[in-house]
């Protein structure tokens, strides 16, 4: 696990400034504290920070191929590198190391751009080919590892594992991308391929980018993989029962190769517990596990984690986080480099901090809810779709539209009385309804929050366009699969995987994610929806397969999530900071917001009339980002 950076001049052959590339690379030293080095060619500079996991003494980067033709910088792990090593050796390629990096180089020399189809793992890499005078870039299929890039007016293509690498270049323009403010206040993160900056991008998951000397501008990235979308025949139910555990165990097994201490997160939820169960059956020594607890009972899952730890006799470690653990607020803005509003980043940071005290590699259970329809919102979405199928949109809009506007936002009421969002969604089609469900501030709320000038500047754009792009691609699937696919392209990569990557690498911890192994995803996404979501239970096929391996209470209890008590924080210890931040001069004079609505959101929350905690956290994280921007 590492950090990569580089500068590639499309036309100039002058030597890249060594101090400049060093400055950029040093911004991500936390990603690779063990070593750092550089490669220079005319108009090319590649940089690397290394966290040693496999072949500790060998595999230095940047790495040149044996024939000196190509050089690579690589972040991630290739789990099938030993098989590829054998295949490429049989074709006559030389290997001077025992790690996975050299496998990528030789795969490039043999298969060119098609090398990505051979790689199984999590990765972001850049290869400079001296013979072809090209820079080839690739990101793994699900987006576990990040890749940021920008083309400067000078013709310099710059890239890095984090945005702070890009912004370290003195010629980078820090103007914000107008539409991503709308995206952020809708979704809580900036979705691929954009960043908060007008001139910086993320390479989307499952995409490659090829640049040649002499190019006049940025070429379009190419998609090389997608979740399989055309099912001629769904998986037979017997096959699910027979193969799910076998396939999951194989995905876990290949992620247990490391020359450093290895363990797993164990939250007490189904997914991390499943990973620990598989690990325990694959190794003779006890698995190292860790969990974060909360001193507020409704947020604490440690008893369920302990039951799994007891069953498999793991080396289990628990630390309790106080309900007032909000000291990370400003640190999070620095960590994520752009506005990011998932408050579970705080406990995620803490569990990575705990894990790194004992291991260098940790497996996680991320991706199970997206893959097997585990979120409660899928059940709601499915129920809404049944009504949509009974009534055409032309009838639903005049019935449910006014109800959605008039029905009060009853945060204080029992859940069955909180129907406002449902009424709103019923007046929409499938994709718009799901977008409404996923929005932190919904369309009407954003209309109140944003200033008239900012709304005019959007020219009608809304973040719904992102959901439409993905929804249109899978409109032939059922409503639940559509929602799952959209989540894999947006929420999983933009929120979940981003959160884990930054929080883990802040502690120089490598996190591996077996449930979204691409081969497992290709098989599991084919499981029929009625086998995943039935009788009000989500992730059913996964849970049934795990019944012999995990306690019933772990499998079938109500999902808790990795939440923090925001509502209480804003009415107590963070109240003063909330006023100072959200109503600060840089917020009220930014041109984005309606000041009276900012005041109203705070007052309604403090008084208890509304629970605006999610909206207020989103605003507070944005203010923290703006403040750090100004300070740089």
Image (cartoon, rainbow, N blue to C red):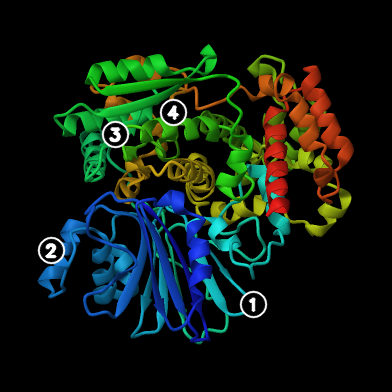
Q: From the image, tell me which residue sits under label 3.
A: 263
- Along the viewing direction, whichever of 511 and 326 lies nearer the viewer: 326
Q: Residue at x 52, y 63 (%)?
A: 23
Which residue is label 2 attached to?
86
Label 1 Cα crowd, 10 Å radius (few <14 / some 14-19 / many 20+): few
Say above or below: 142 vs 250: below
Q: Tell me the distance, in whole angstroms, between the alpha carbons under discs 3 and 4.
A: 27 Å
The residue at the point 28 percent across, 26 percent down is 546
357, 102: nearer the viewer: 357
x%, y% of residue 620? 71, 37
| CA distance for labels 4 and 2 | 42 Å
Secondary-structure class at tag 4:
loop
Q: Secondary structure at mark 1?
A: loop
Name the one closer to the observer, 601 or 520: 601
Dividing the picture into quadrants, the one containing residue 544 is top left
Which residue in the structure is indicated by mark 4?
Answer: 538
The residues tagged by marks 1 and 2 sit, at their Cα atoms, a distance apart of: 44 Å
Q: Residues within 10 Å of mark 2 (few under 14, many from 20)?
A: few
Residues at discs 3 and 1 in contact (Cβ within 8 Å): no
Which percent across, then down, holds residue 551?
A: 30, 17
Q: Mark 2 falls on what kind of element?
A: helix
Q: Mark 1 — residue?
A: 153
**Which of label 3 and label 4 is nearer to you?**
3
Q: Earlier in the sequence, mark 1 or mark 2?
A: 2
- Tell us which disc is closer to us: 4 or 2: 2
């Amino acid at each position: 696990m590492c950090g990569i950076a580089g500068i590639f001049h499309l036309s100039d052959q002058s030597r890249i400034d060594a101090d400049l590339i060093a400055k950029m690379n040093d911004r991500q030293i936390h990603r690779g504290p063990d070593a750092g080095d550089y490669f220079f060619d005319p108009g090319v500079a590649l940089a690397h920070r290394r966290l040693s996991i496999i072949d500790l003494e060998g595999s230095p980067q940047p790495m040149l191929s044996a024939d000196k033709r190509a050089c690579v910088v690589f972040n991630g792990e290739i789990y099938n590198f030993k098989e590829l090593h054998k295949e490429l050796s049989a074709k006559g390629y030389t290997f001077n190391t025992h790690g996975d990096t050299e496998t990528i180089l030789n795969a490039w020399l043999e298969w060119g751009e098609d090398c990505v189809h051979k790689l199984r793992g999590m990765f972001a890499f850049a290869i400079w080919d001296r013979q072809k005078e090209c820079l080839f870039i690739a990101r793994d299929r699900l987006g576990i590892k990040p890749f940021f890039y920008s083309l400067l007016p000078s013709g310099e293509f710059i890239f890095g594992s984090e945005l702070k690498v890009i912004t370290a270049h003195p010629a980078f323009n820090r103007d914000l991308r107008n539409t991503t403010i709308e995206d952020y206040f809708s979704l809580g993160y900036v979705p691929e391929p954009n960043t908060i900056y007008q001139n910086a991008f993320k390479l989307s998951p499952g995409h490659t980018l090829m640049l040649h000397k002499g190019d006049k501008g940025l070429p379009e990235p190419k998609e090389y993989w997608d979740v399989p979308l055309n099912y001629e025949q769904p998986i037979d139910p017997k096959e699910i029962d027979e193969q799910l555990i076998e396939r999951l165990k194989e995905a876990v097994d290949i992620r247990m190769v490391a020359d450093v201490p290895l363990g797993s997160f164990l939250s007490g939820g189904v997914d991390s517990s499943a990973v620990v169960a598989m690990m325990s059956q694959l190794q003779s020594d006890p698995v190292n596990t860790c969990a974060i607890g909360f001193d507020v009972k409704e947020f604490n899952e440690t008893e369920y984690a302990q039951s799994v730890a007891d069953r498999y006799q793991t080396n289990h470690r628990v630390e309790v986080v106080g309900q007032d653990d909000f000291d990370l607020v400003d640190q999070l803005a620095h960590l994520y480099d752009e506005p990011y509003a998932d408050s579970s980043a705080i406990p995620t940071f803490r569990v990575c901090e705990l894990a790194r005290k004992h291991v260098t590699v940790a497996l996680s259970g991320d991706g199970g809810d997206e893959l097997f329809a585990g979120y409660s919102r899928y059940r709601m979405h499915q129920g809404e779709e049944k009504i949509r199928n009974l009534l055409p949109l032309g009838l639903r809009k005049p019935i449910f539209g006014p109800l959605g506007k008039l029905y009060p936002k009853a945060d204080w009421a029992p859940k069955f009385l909180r129907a406002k969002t449902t009424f709103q969604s019923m007046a929409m089609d499938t994709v718009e309804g799901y977008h409404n469900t996923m929005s932190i501030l919904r369309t009407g709320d954003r209309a109140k929050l944003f200033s008239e000038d900012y709304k005019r500047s959007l020219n009608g754009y809304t973040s719904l366009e992102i959901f439409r792009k993905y929804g249109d691609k899978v409109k032939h699937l059922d409503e639940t699969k559509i929602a799952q696919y959209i989540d894999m392209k947006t929420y999983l990569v933009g929120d979940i995987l981003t959160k884990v990557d930054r929080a883990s690498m802040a502690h120089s911890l490598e996190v591996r994610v077996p449930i979204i192994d691409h081969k497992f995803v290709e098989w599991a996404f084919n499981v029929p929806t009625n086998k995943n979501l039935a009788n009000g239970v989500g992730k059913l096929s996964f849970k049934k397969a795990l019944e012999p391996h995990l306690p019933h209470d772990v499998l079938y209890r109500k999902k808790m999530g990795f939440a923090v008590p925001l509502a209480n924080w804003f009415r107590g210890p963070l109240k003063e900071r909330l006023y100072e931040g959200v109503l600060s001069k840089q917020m009220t004079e930014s041109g984005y917001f309606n000041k009276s609505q900012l005041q109203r959101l705070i007052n309604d929350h403090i008084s208890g009339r509304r629970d605006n905690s999610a909206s207020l956290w989103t605003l507070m994280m944005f203010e923290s980002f703006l403040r750090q921007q100004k300070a740089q």
